[in-house]
Image (cartoon, grey):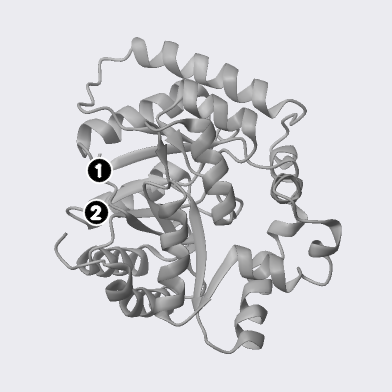
């Protein structure tokens, strides 16, 4: 699968109106970005429905779920969806799956007590289901795990084609590559904002970070990386904000993306922070030359 070095992660690709999503997808494809990523959470489209809109609207760019929630469908449905898009759009779809977060899972009526064991059992069931399917996806759509901590990264290494970490600084990318080894795909997400004023940039970043800092998975991962309790007060310390959100001019943002690539990432999914798709496309247009993204690639 050709995901390219630089992709675009945007929550509105999974929840904005279908016409606006199609327009944004076509524009991002024309700029030369490699992959479109979107999440699955309350208020979004079902992941495979969202992927279908993006795949049908475009011609070359790849589409990846970042992530499809394992609690939203059983393993047979997940395997069938991945195979269907792998067959229909050869080389253009990647299936990112994850365990989500305890508050979101409990809303669905499930028990989040053992997420690693749940993912391992889910992968077992996916493999059994896929073996019985007549759909032929050649090449098969890659399977990526939303992996932060070492044990889930090990599972991504052993039972998937790679990992898609979210809300992580470059030091996590280095740790992830060490655990994964050289072969698996490593595709972290990186939030970015083109804003040179430090106070304004950090204000935008903190607004973005606020809901994530309420989720234990992300906080525990950052604590594991060496951040301290005081880094999570007041919307996040400047140190933490600057680690999670790349801000400044296009060259400053490009240096952060380069730090992930130097740390071992194969692909970086950048998330522009303007809340509307048009603003996001404008920032992606400005960033493209500094990132080495070229139309038609």
Secondary element at tag 2: loop
Q: Going 46% across and 55% down the picture, which residue do you hit?
A: 260
Q: Going 36% across and 80% down the picture, which residue do you hit?
A: 282
Q: Which mark is residue 122?
A: none
| Residue at far bottom of view | 197
Q: Which of 173 and 293 is in front in this view?
A: 173
Secondary element at tag 1: loop
Looking at the image, is 193 positioned above or below residue 98? below
**Residue 74: image x %, image y %?**
53, 25
Q: Going 51% across and 76% down the picture, which residue do you hit?
A: 193
**Residue 281: image x %, image y %?**
36, 74
Whichever of callouts 2 and 1 sits on the residue coming sooner in the sequence is 2
The quarter of the picture where the C terminus appears is: bottom left
Q: Going 56% across and 51% down the picture, which residue do you hit?
A: 166
The quarter of the picture where the N terminus appears is: top left
| Residue at far left of view | 296
Q: CA separation, marks 2 and 1?
A: 7 Å
Q: Nearer the viewer, residue 126 or 266?
A: 266
Can you tell which quarter of the image residue 179 is in? top right
Q: Mark 2 points at which residue?
A: 61
Q: How many marks?
A: 2
**Residue 153: image x %, image y %?**
56, 32
Q: Which of 63 and 265 is in front in this view?
A: 265
Q: Nearer the viewer, residue 10 or 186?
A: 186
Q: Is residue 146 visible?
A: no
User: Would you say the residues marked 2 and 1 are in contact, meaning their CB atoms lie under 8 Å apart?
Assistant: yes
Can you tell which quarter of the image residue 237 is in? bottom right
Q: Is residue 79 visible?
A: yes
Q: Mark 1 points at which residue?
A: 92
Label 2: how many residues lie within 10 Å, few (<14), some (14-19) or many (20+)? many
């Amino acid at each position: 699968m050709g995901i390219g070095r630089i992709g675009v992660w945007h929550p509105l690709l999974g929840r904005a109106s279908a016409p606006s999503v199609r327009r944004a997808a076509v524009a991002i494809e024309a700029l030369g970005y490699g992959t479109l990523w979107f999440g699955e959470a309350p208020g979004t489209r079902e992941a495979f429905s969202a992927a279908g809109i993006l795949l049908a609207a475009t011609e070359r760019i790849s589409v990846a779920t970042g992530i499809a929630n394992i609690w939203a469908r059983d393993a047979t449905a997940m395997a069938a969806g991945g195979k269907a898009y792998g067959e229909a759009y050869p080389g253009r779809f990647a299936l990112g799956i994850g365990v989500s977060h305890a508050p979101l899972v409990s809303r669905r009526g499930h028990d989040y007590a053992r997420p690693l064991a749940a993912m391992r059992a889910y992968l077992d069931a996916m493999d059994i289901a896929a073996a019985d399917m007549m759909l032929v996806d050649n090449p098969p759509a890659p399977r990526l795990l939303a992996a932060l901590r070492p044990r889930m990264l090990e599972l991504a290494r052993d039972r998937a084609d790679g990992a898609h970490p979210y809300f992580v600084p470059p030091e996590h990318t280095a740790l992830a590559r060490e655990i994964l080894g050289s072969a698996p795909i490593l595709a972290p997400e990186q939030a970015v904002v083109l804003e040179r004023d430090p106070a304004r940039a950090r204000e935008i970043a903190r607004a973005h970070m606020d809901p994530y800092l309420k989720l234990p998975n992300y906080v525990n991962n950052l604590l594991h990386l060496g951040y301290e309790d005081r880094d999570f007060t007041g919307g996040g310390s400047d140190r933490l904000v600057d680690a999670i959100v790349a801000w400044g001019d296009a060259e400053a943002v490009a240096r952060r993306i380069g730090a992930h690539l130097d740390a071992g990432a194969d692909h970086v999914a950048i998330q522009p922070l303007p809340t509307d798709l048009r603003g996001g496309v404008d920032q992606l247009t400005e960033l493209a030359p500094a990132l080495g993204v070229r139309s038609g690639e």
